[in-house]
Amino acid sequence: MLAKEYMDIKEYMQTMGQRARVAATAIAAAPSAIKNRALLEIAQLIDERQADLLAANSADVAQARASGMDEAMLDRLTLSPKAITTMIAGLQQIAALPDPVGEMSNLKMRPSGIQVGQMRVPLGVIGIIYEARPNVTIDAAGLCIKSGNASILRGGSEAIHCNRALAAIVKQGLAQAGLPQDVVQVVETTDRAAVGELITMTQYVDIIVPRGGKGLIARLMAESKVPMIKHLDGICHVYIDDQADIEQAKAIAFNAKCHRYGTCNTIETLLVARGIAATVLPQLAPLYASEQVELRCDDESYQLLQGYPHLALAVEDDWATEYLAPILAIKVVDGLDAAIAHINHYSSKHTESIITQHHASAMRFLREVDSASVMVNASTRFADGF
């Protein structure tokens, strides 16, 4: 029986791959107006079917809670009316973006008289594997449609009801715009063998993009035969420079931690320059206290925050931990050099931010911090898609 089930999954995924390869040719050649129409049709259908989506998501959440899913993952799984509004707005924003396909740049005349340049073209078929968050289904579908790529989306089994409902919406939106429904395909089985097949279908899939926890990424790194764009942890930092605006620093440091705990761009460590620490930390502490955030402090910040109700001394592991919880590590540093050194040592190279009014310090931070998203006077939460 198991062998028969495995063959069924293999056949199912192979067929999906074949259809995606055909659809990739169609979407790569699709005019901007048609792609944009598909995005707006999908947005309209999501708006019309909000009640159905919320009901499907409620079934997923109830099942996940019964199975003992932790609060951070439940937060990612839950689809609120506000999240649906954000999904709709995200599709509308993608539709409004310039079409990247066919864009030419760096055209140069060579000594031979030949003109050489670069043109942006679709990748082909993108396999996207993710956990829990049903909004990723729409984010991924929208971006792939706009960029002229076919996609195979495999969401987490915990979101299967909502993802099936979203898959039906996407298919209908594509059809209403005159595009093949196979441009976006959502894997509708929860069998993990489907992932194993997807990441080895080199004849059909051009690149894999995983979005998930360490377990998922580790598995894909070990088993994938398809090239992959990936990251692991989200150990993100905010550094408050000694020339920061205090009110701005407080707002950003609070938002970057407390807006949502279960996301990969939430900060896990706050670094504060010694010259400003005694001023800004006592003002930040009541904000964190209002959300019952535990502060794990180095010796210096621990002394500055005596009397804070949720205080502990940090240990070495705290600087390298992705909490995904109301816990924040805090360290007082000598200045910019020490902050950059700490970040480049402990960071997972995801998202970092400096709060400063000093232009030269901001530019050094941008140049010398080795992370995918590096920001000046902005919350790390801005790295989260919409």
Image: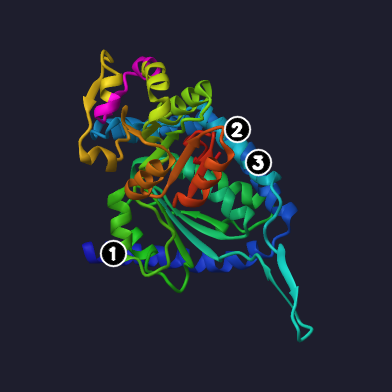
Per the model, the C-alpha gap separating discs 3 and 1 is 36 Å
Nearest to the observer: residue 315 or residue 259: 315
Give the secondary structure at mark 3. helix
Q: Is 251 located above or below residue 220 in the figure?
A: above
Give the secondary structure at mark 1. helix
Whether residue 95 is visible here, answered yes or no, is yes
Q: Which mark, residue 222? A: 1
| Magenta-tinted stretch | 286-301
Picture coordinates of residue 3, whole percent (x, y) = 23, 66
Q: Relative to residue 355, is residue 349 drawn left or right?
A: left
Q: Relative to residue 205, is residue 286 drawn left or right?
A: left
Amino acid at the residue labelled 3: Gln
Residue 324 is a magenta residue? no
* Contact between labelled residues 2 and 1, with CB atoms less than 8 Å apart: no
Judged by depth in the image, the label closer to the viewer, 1 or 2, is 1
Amino acid at the residue labelled 1: Ala
Q: Determine which residue is flagged by label 2.
A: 47
Judged by depth in the image, the label closer to the viewer, 3 or 2, is 3
Marked residue nearer the N-terminal end (3 or 1): 3
Nearest to the observer: residue 281 or residue 84: 281
Q: Residue at x 43, y 72 (%)?
A: 202
